[in-house]
Amino acid sequence: MDDSKVERTLAGVVAGHFRARPGRWIDGREIAQIAGCYGWRTRISDARRPPHNLNIRNRQRRVRTADGQVFTVSEYKLVTDEVRSGEGARCSGHVALNEETEAPRLF
């Protein structure tokens, strides 16, 4: 399949969205606006497989609103070689923040 056909699929649009924002956490609701509210998780899964082969990470966190409502925020991030090398430079000490849990981890 040529690149022009790949980018016209919803998975291609989602892959392009991540490529334009490497290393940035993106709220699932933002992705749902471009990939559809019923298929955005599938489009992320599709972007992880050929022909895109993106390394997309996920984290979830619970948020409490001012009125006491609790909901889960699901965020996704494209990890590239450039982002990985940048993370290594930031983690030059003995303790780093685990981005998945926001808890300290030793390495």
Image (cartoon, helix red, strand yellow):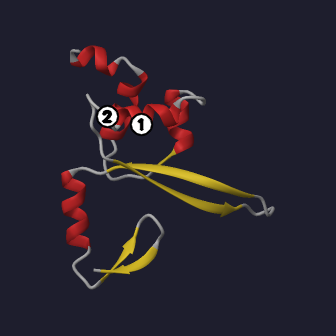
Taking the image as shown, residue 61 lies to the left or right of residue 47, namely right
Task: Determine the secondary structure under disc 1.
Answer: helix
Taking the image as shown, residue 8 lies to the left or right of residue 92, namely right
User: Furthest-bottom residue in view?
Assistant: 94
Rendered image quadrant of residue 37: top right
- Cα separation, mark 2 vs mark 1, equals 7 Å
Image quarter of the C terminus: bottom left
Dot label at residue 45: 1
Dot label at residue 49: 2
Determine whether label 2 and label 1 are within 8 Å by CB: yes
- x and y percent of residue 59 in the render? 48, 57
Which residue type does callout 1 highlight? Ser
Q: Residue at x 37, y 35 (%)?
A: 17
Q: Residue at x 81, y 61 (%)?
A: 67
- x and y percent of residue 26 in the render? 46, 47
Q: Residue at x 52, y 39 (%)?
A: 30
Rendered image quadrant of residue 68: bottom right
Taking the image as shown, residue 11 lies to the left or right of residue 36, namely left
Taking 55 as reference, is 5 above or below it? above
Q: Residues within 10 Å of mark 1 (few under 14, many from 20)?
A: few
